Amino acid sequence: MKTGWIFGGIAAALIVTASGCGKSPSGPVTLFQWQDYMEPPFLADYQKAYGEKPAITIFADEDEAFSKMRAGFKPDVMGPCYYEFPRWKEAGLLAPIDTTKLKNWDKISPTLKNLPGISAGPGKVWFVPHYWGNTSLTIRTDLAPEYAKSQSWDILFDPKYKGRVSVMDGVDDTVPFIARMAGVNAYDMSEADWVKVQAKLRELVPHLRFVSSDDTALAQGLASGELVAAMSWRTTFASLHREKKPVAYLNPPGGIFTYVCGLVMHKDPSNEDKALALIDSSLSDEAAVYTISHIGDEPANTGRCPRCPTSCSRTWASSATWRPS
């Protein structure tokens, strides 16, 4: 998300559109998705099947995406995360997805296919798992070697590194993260717990260089040494690691936060068959390999792990803290 919530509330994020809102029922379907997940490998099977590219609209923030759809925007396929899709369902924006029409459904990890709340009845789901990733701290191991050893998130509050750390700008990232550091479950907070978390957040602010969820800004800050530690998704770490930068992704005692993002279908798709084909295209083997090798997340499709450049066999469920719906 692209919001400066710590310093003044949740601001509206910029939505960049690559196509108009209107479409003919016989024209391409529209994908409403995070930018990384509308690259050619995710669209290739759809294009082969229909000889056309889908229309594309990028969102940078799920709150703004939700508001845009509530205001009347009607994409066909959308890419929210697991913690977000129930709100879209409850608002009446979604239609069930027939998994028997998805050739790649059986390649999805059984754990992900059985996430609580996604079933819409026999053979149908509200949410098709697409990929998963983590939220933790990426650190410069040469600049903070003691934290590479301890794996502790306490570096955010260490006076030694004041002004050289950053956190993400989404409330669904930073609040649970800091709450956990304060010994509070952000998903089951009492009023007293929230007061405790607010105090911890106020304590954090003077330590921050900046607040951002932008992968480029975080990677540049860490690469230059402007930042010693940055709260980030694993994708930031992955890009720096590919560049041979001295970085580590911290996994403290108790594990790190894990999120799952997926694909949903609008209640009124312009063409249901095309919408399902676009969902299936995003789950392809080619897309799975691209997810690991170019983005740094892990695909829900585990059927082609031998082709993956890094191991798909990491034990993630046991070391992760789920964001509940």
Image (spheres, rainbow, N blue to C red):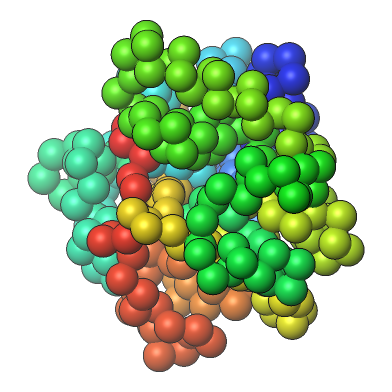
Question: Can residue 34 be seen by looking at this rendering?
Answer: yes
| Depicted 151 relative to depicted 285: above or below | above
Which residue is depicted at the point 44% across and 32% down? Answer: 182
Q: How many marks?
A: 0
| Depicted 269 relative to depicted 103: above or below | above
Q: Quadrant of residue 110?
A: bottom left
Which residue is depicted at the point 51% across and 35% down? Answer: 178
Q: Quadrant of residue 52?
A: bottom right
Which residue is depicted at the point 59% across and 44% down? Answer: 33
Depth check: 254 or 145 in front?
145
Residue 288: image x %, image y %? 48, 72
Question: Can residue 64 be seen by looking at this rendering?
Answer: no
Residue pushed farthest bottom?
Answer: 306
Q: Quadrant of residue 203?
A: top right
Depth check: 227 or 63 in front?
227
Depth check: 201 or 176 in front?
201
Which residue is depicted at the point 42% across and 37% down? Answer: 180
Residue 289: image x %, image y %? 52, 77
Depth check: 3 or 266 in front?
3
Residue 275: image x %, image y %? 46, 47
Residue pushed farthest top?
Answer: 191
Residue 154: image x %, image y %? 56, 48
Q: Quadrant of the C terminus?
A: top left
Residue pushed farthest front?
Answer: 159
Q: Quadrant of the N terminus?
A: top right
| Depicted 323 relative to depicted 260: above or below | above
| Depicted 265 relative to depicted 101: above or below | above
